[in-house]
Image (tube, grey):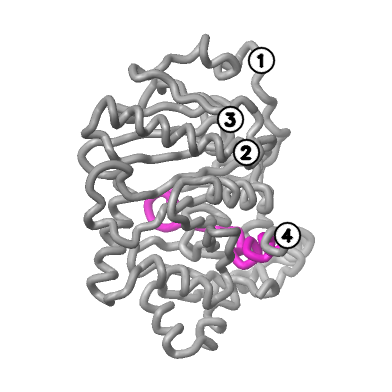
Amino acid sequence: MSSLSIADLPALIATLAPQAQARFRRIFRVDVSEGVLHLTPELRAWAQQRFGDWGAVERQRVIRVTNRVTLESAAFNPLRARRPLPMSDAPQPLQADEDIFADPLRTTPADVFGRAQGAHCITASNIARWEGWGSVVIFDEPDIHRLTAAHLCDCFRVSLEWACRAHAYDPQARFFLWTWNAGLKAGASISHAHAQVALARGTHYAGVERLRRDAQAYRRAHGIDYFADLFAAHADVGLTFRLADVSGLVYLTPLRPRETWLLANALDDALANALHTVIRTLSLECFNVVAFMPPLFGSQAGWEGFPVILRIGDRGSTRLRSSDIGAVDLYAQAVIAADPFAARAQLEGALRA
């Protein structure tokens, strides 16, 4: 499987057993298009040096994968990873006197119900909040690349404690969201490592609720659990893995390159360890993580079969000056330069350890 590429996906699907092929096509549609262009002799020399094969530039194959259930779509062309991009030196870290998270008890506000604190992190009320109940979870280690699995385990425990405190103070708030913008390029406003937690009233966050509705519609239409079929479809083409008790897949309709899903029963140590392994094995410089899960409190009717899902997306090099997201990504479909099969192959070493 490690020698496969996204270009092999159509042929790979064709080799599946009829039942597996039907399952894959129930969830995914794959379209192939060819872009043809003509290079001048001067451009051929440049393309040969830049891309290794000017012929591959003149005839480019684009694989578009659409999730029929969720209507997520991604266009893959690994040649785009080698296109010229404006690069600069890596951003300098914040100086100690600029880091307002260096001494959070003194320089950050507390929630009205107090702070949750663990061995490696502490909560602070979000001073410019995007949710009524929203806080940050500040690591004692400011550098995201020096965080250990123990840091992430502690962060999950502290985050859940914060959620319990917020719910006790406001019993109508019961829909929990955990996010991590790892690095300034990934949307963090402060470079000191921190995650964010929120607890909503009324209904779950739109992205989570939309996935729940899509999964429920799939179950009604086919009598089968969507997440089980989603994992099986990825397994059939060699894009799944397991890390202890956590199932993982490299997603075929990602929002960002090398998007990896981890599926578990709880926001616990096993999931934190798996997250740490994925981040380190894929050598992510800047990245986003979100945790989707059923409501933490109150009724879970309608959430049957919905696991805890971590979605991990690569935001690219810290040296890249241009944005990694454009109009097509925002409003039409994701455009992905990284090959998901290459990401799965990269994870192979961790799976054998």
Q: Mark 1 is on which residue type?
A: Ala
Mark earlier in primary sequence (4, 3): 3
From mark 2 to mark 3, how far is it between C-alphas? Answer: 14 Å
Residues in magenta, as a range: 327-348
Q: Quadrant of the N terminus?
A: bottom right
The residue that disc 1 covers is 96
Badges 2 and 4: C-beta atoms under 8 Å apart? no
> Going 58% across and 35% down the picture, which residue do you hit?
183
Whether residue 79 is visible: no
Query: Which dot marks residue 193?
Result: 3
From mark 3 to mark 1, how far is it between C-alphas? Answer: 14 Å
**Residue 298 screen position, x and y as percent:** 24, 43
Badges 3 and 1: C-beta atoms under 8 Å apart? no
Mark 4 Cα within 10 Å, few/some/many (few <14, many 20+)? few
User: Element at badge 4?
Assistant: loop
Q: Is residue 26 above or below residue 247?
A: below
Q: Mark 3 is on which residue type?
A: Ala
From mark 2 to mark 4, how far is it between C-alphas? Answer: 18 Å
Q: Mark 4 is on which residue type?
A: Ala
**Residue 209 screen position, x and y as percent:** 28, 51
User: Element at badge 2?
Assistant: helix
The residue that disc 2 covers is 150
Q: Nearer the viewer, mark 2 or mark 3?
A: 2
> Going 49% across and 65% down the picture, which residue do you hit?
252
Query: Which dot marks residue 353?
Result: 4
**Residue 12 screen position, x and y as percent:** 56, 82
Q: Is residue 340 magenta?
A: yes
Mark 1 Cα within 10 Å, few/some/many (few <14, many 20+)? few
Using the image as rendered, state which of residue 317 and residue 278 is in the foreground. 278
User: Element at badge 3?
Assistant: loop
* Quarter of the rendering containing residue 142: top right
